[in-house]
């Protein structure tokens, strides 16, 4: 991403993936990166979940499959994270693992989930995804994204 610090460069090697939360007034800002668009989206979901739940020792109890229609990269990021927030609010599903695959007409997303009541809650639960400064794009180390999540 533009403005990467030296610390970011050590973490974001070509092909590497990961995520982190960064300070943001009253909300949560998640940055994620991966060798591909799909891996970056996986990391964004896991980064958002880890801002409010400890899923480190949690096993999935179900798999939910979601078809995301093709759109701009930013649209896909927002739609995927909105889907996670929706499923959390409506079904109580928390993703503990994610797979994203590009198909002809968009993305095939598999969310391995568990019930929110079975995981330790460590922060404010997300309520919405903000479009302010949201982006998903290729860069010198692969793909990266950033998003602010309203809590």
Image (cartoon, rainbow, N blue to C red):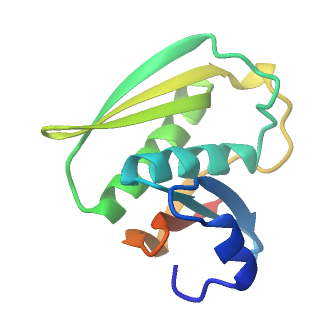
Which residue is most to the bottom? 3
- Pick the residue in front: 47 or 36: 36
* Residue 17 in picture, x, y percent from top left: 58, 53
Residue 105 against residue 138 in the figure, above or below: above
Q: In this view, does 120 lie to the left or right of 114?
A: right
Counting from the top left corner in percent of width and height, residue 36 is at 40, 53
Relative to residue 10, is residue 147 drawn left or right? Answer: left
Give me the residue at 33% from left, 53% from top. 76
Q: In this view, does 61 lie above or below 25?
A: above
Q: Quarter holding the C terminus?
A: bottom right
Name the spot of residue 120 as percent of width and height, x first: 86, 31
Residue 22 image point, x, y percent = 74, 70
Is residue 29 at all visible to an observer of this figure? no
Would residue 123 be seen by someone viewing this image from the given angle? yes
Please state the total of marks drawn on the protein image.
Answer: 0
Is residue 113 shown above or below 136? above
User: Residue 63 vs residue 16: left or right?
Assistant: left
Which residue is rendered at x = 47% and y = 47% of the image?
39
Q: Residue at horizontal 44%, vertical 40%? A: 83
Which residue is most to the left?
Answer: 104
- Relative to 55, is 47 on the left or the right? left
Q: Nearer the viewer, residue 72 or 123?
A: 72
């Amino acid at each position: 991403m533009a403005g990467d610090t030296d610390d970011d460069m050590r973490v974001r090697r070509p092909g590497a993936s990961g995520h982190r939360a960064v300070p943001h007034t009253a909300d949560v800002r998640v940055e994620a990166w991966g060798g591909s668009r799909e891996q970056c989206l996986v990391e964004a979901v896991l980064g958002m979940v880890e801002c409010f739940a400890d899923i480190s020792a949690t096993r999935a109890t179900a798999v939910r499959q979601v078809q995301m229609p093709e759109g701009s990269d930013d649209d896909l990021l927002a739609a995927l994270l909105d889907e996670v927030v929706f499923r959390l609010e409506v079904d109580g599903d928390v993703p503990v693992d994610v797979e994203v695959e590009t198909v002809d007409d968009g993305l095939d997303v598999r969310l391995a989930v568990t019930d929110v009541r079975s995981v330790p809650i460590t922060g404010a639960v997300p309520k919405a995804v903000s479009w302010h400064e949201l982006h998903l794009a290729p860069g010198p180390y692969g793909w990266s994204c950033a998003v602010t999540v309203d809590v």
